Image (cartoon, rainbow, N blue to C red):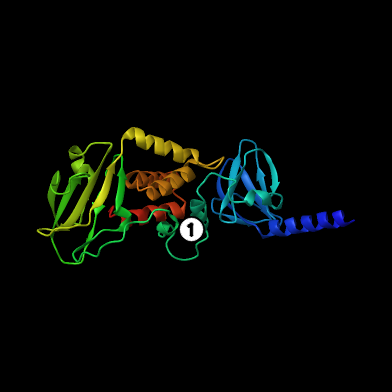
Amino acid sequence: MKKLQFLILCCLFAGMLSAQNSYMLYSFKGNVSVVENKVESKAKVGKTVSANAVVKVSNGAAVTIICNEAAMFTFSKAGSYALNKFGDSCTVGNHSVSANYVKYVWAQMTKSSGSPGSNRKAYMNTVGAVSRGLPNVWVDSRLDTINYAGGSFPISWKSYEEAKEFDFKLYTYDNISTPIFSTVIKDKKKIDINSFTDKINPGNSYFWTASIKGEESEEYKTLNYVTKEDFEQVENKLKSQGAAFEAKAEQAYRMAFMLEDAHFLSEAFQYYTKAATLDSTNALYRSTLMSFRKDYELK
């Protein structure tokens, strides 16, 4: 009798936990619909549903769902799935996608105010170095370290003074006394990495500084020129960390977020652009691309 009571209590407790779970449609393909409160509607990326909903998946279709802001699971076989029976799939760790990214997507898709995608940094692991507070030039901490494999991308800075000319200098990692490249930037506060790639070699790391013309800077920032082969390894590893099913637009957006977190900024820009192009109706993808452009002076 006691065992029976214990089992009943466990079932009731499990049911209560399942009812408290909340879900969001992350990505889907084919004919997928959701039945909630006896009303059936077509699937939509970012749609939140309760544990009482039923997800219907047709032949050849698939859907990946976020649960409780942290976990992901996929339905890839035809059928009707009552979400209240999949509470055990809501445990963090049952998926290979970064928990930070999953939390980020949930927060942005459910955001009621502000610009979606503008606070990406709050969900990323990497943080920049503390600035020593030079009075004339300030570099965003996002640019403290740049991993670069190719493409057009600017290094930018801001100035507290109304200067019109700036010195940009590039050094090898083992010699910061003599720059291997220096130039004067006029009427702007950025320089495209493409403009000096003929001075650097893939597989090597460099320091760079920016300062008002004629002044010196001790704020050395890092530029790692990554080989194509090494970047492909990073790229393939990140692709493999996706959910069991992930549409091309969602994969591109996740890749962009994770590459930005890993300081592959030029490459992240390419993937943010790809995501916004693949799903032009997704407000988060469009807004993030605009925010990224603003953050890194890509105008």
Q: Is residue 265 left or right of residue 124?
A: left
- Residue lying at the far front of the rendered structure: 174
Give the quarter of the figure containing the C terminus: bottom left
Q: Which residue is mark 1?
A: 108
Q: Is residue 144 left or right of residue 60?
A: left
Callout 1, which amino acid? Answer: Gln
Q: Is residue 160 left or right of residue 115?
A: left
Q: In x, y percent, where is residue 284?
A: 45, 54
Residue drawn at x 71%, y 55% is: 38
Residue 89 in sight here: yes
The quarter of the displayed image where residue 140 is located: bottom left
Q: In x, y percent, where is residue 120?
A: 42, 56
The quarter of the displayed image where residue 173 is located: top left
Q: In x, y percent, where is residue 103?
A: 52, 55
Using a 10 Å C-alpha cutoff, classify the residue at mark 1 as few (fewer than 14 neighbours), some (14 to 19) or many (20 or more): many
Give the quarter of the figure containing the N terminus: bottom right
- Residue lying at the far right of the rendered structure: 1
Residue drawn at x 28%, y 36% is: 203
Residue drawn at x 45%, y 41% is: 238
Q: Nearer the viewer, residue 92 or 299?
A: 92
Residue drawn at x 24%, y 54% is: 156
Q: In x, y percent, where is residue 183?
A: 12, 49
